[in-house]
């Protein structure tokens, strides 16, 4: 379903969000005070304008309160990030996601009502470290501080086994969400389905249980 997003701050993170959402068919308004960055994003969004993130009148003139969601991706100017968040929340924007720079910045954004606070470098660092830590982990999504979804490659020793023989839930308290390979994605697989070498298991659970399944179940 097509949505309207406004992205404020066109550094590498903000520009990437713009282009990806635009590619997915959404309407994007991109805003930055730097005219060169605005010029560079023209083909990766629906509209792009030069404006100050804390110019309330300018933001109102763009009709931002009618957008489905705002992403504040301002780089190093923490003050502008906080003021922009406050302005958008007071304007009644439905959802405001904000890139945070520091722990203190995060706390302040929480206090003024940011709907989601993002740490792109930290989140990507965790995903990369998790993949580097284990040859079995293909990808990793953090759901909360204690729960995650991981994609695990299947080793030879479990090839041709039925899913029931992995005891994913019984022994490890994890949930097998799906199995995928080069040809298909099997969501909610049957206990009678067989695992083949090279299949990727999509598993959800607590970080502790996932680690136990990775080390002992595979």
Image (tube, rainbow, N blue to C red):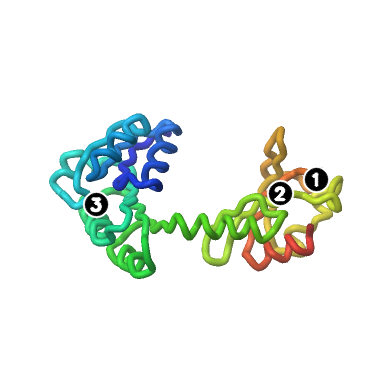
Taking depth in this image into account, of 192 and 59 the one nearest to the observer is 59
Is residue 193 left or right of 41 when viewed as pictured?
right
Where is the N terminus found, in terms of image quarters? top left
The reply to whether residue 65 is visible in this rendering is no
Measure how far apart labels 2 and 3 are at the Cα level.
41 Å
Q: Which residue is mark 1?
A: 195
Q: Which mark is residue 201?
A: 2
Please identify the quarter of the rendering in which residue 194 is found: top right
Residue topped by disc 3: 88
Q: Secondary structure at mark 2?
A: strand
- For disc 1, the neighbor class at 10 Å (few under 14, some 14 to 19, many from 20) is many
**Proximity of marks 2 and 3: CB atoms separated by less than 8 Å:** no
* Placement of the C terminus among the 4 image quadrants: bottom right
Q: Mark 2: few, some, or many residues within 10 Å (few <14, many ≥20)?
A: many
Residue 15 falls left or right of residue 211? left
Q: Quadrant of residue 205?
A: bottom right
Q: Are marks 1 and 2 in contact (CB under 8 Å)?
A: yes
- Return the residue nearer the eye: 59 or 90: 59
């Amino acid at each position: 379903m097509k949505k309207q997003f406004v992205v404020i701050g066109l550094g590498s993170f903000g520009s990437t969000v713009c282009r990806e959402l635009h590619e997915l068919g959404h309407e994007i308004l991109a805003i930055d005070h730097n005219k060169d960055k605005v010029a560079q994003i023209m083909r990766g969004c629906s509209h792009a304008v030069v404006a100050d993130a804390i110019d309330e009148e300018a933001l109102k003139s763009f009709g931002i309160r009618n957008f489905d969601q705002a992403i504040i991706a301002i780089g190093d100017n923490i003050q502008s990030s906080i003021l922009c968040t406050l302005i958008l929340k007071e304007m009644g924007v439905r959802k405001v996601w904000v890139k945070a720079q520091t722990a203190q910045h995060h706390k302040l954004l929480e206090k003024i009502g940011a709907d989601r606070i993002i740490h792109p470098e930290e989140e990507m660092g965790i995903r990369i470290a998790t993949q580097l830590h284990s040859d079995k982990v293909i990808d990793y999504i953090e759901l909360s501080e204690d729960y995650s979804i991981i994609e695990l490659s299947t080793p030879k020793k479990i090839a041709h086994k039925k899913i029931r023989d992995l005891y994913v839930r019984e022994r490890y308290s994890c949930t097998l969400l799906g199995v995928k390979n080069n040809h298909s994605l099997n969501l909610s697989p049957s206990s009678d389905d067989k695992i083949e070498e090279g299949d990727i298991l999509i598993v959800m659970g607590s970080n502790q249980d996932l680690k136990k399944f990775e080390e002992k179940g595979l």
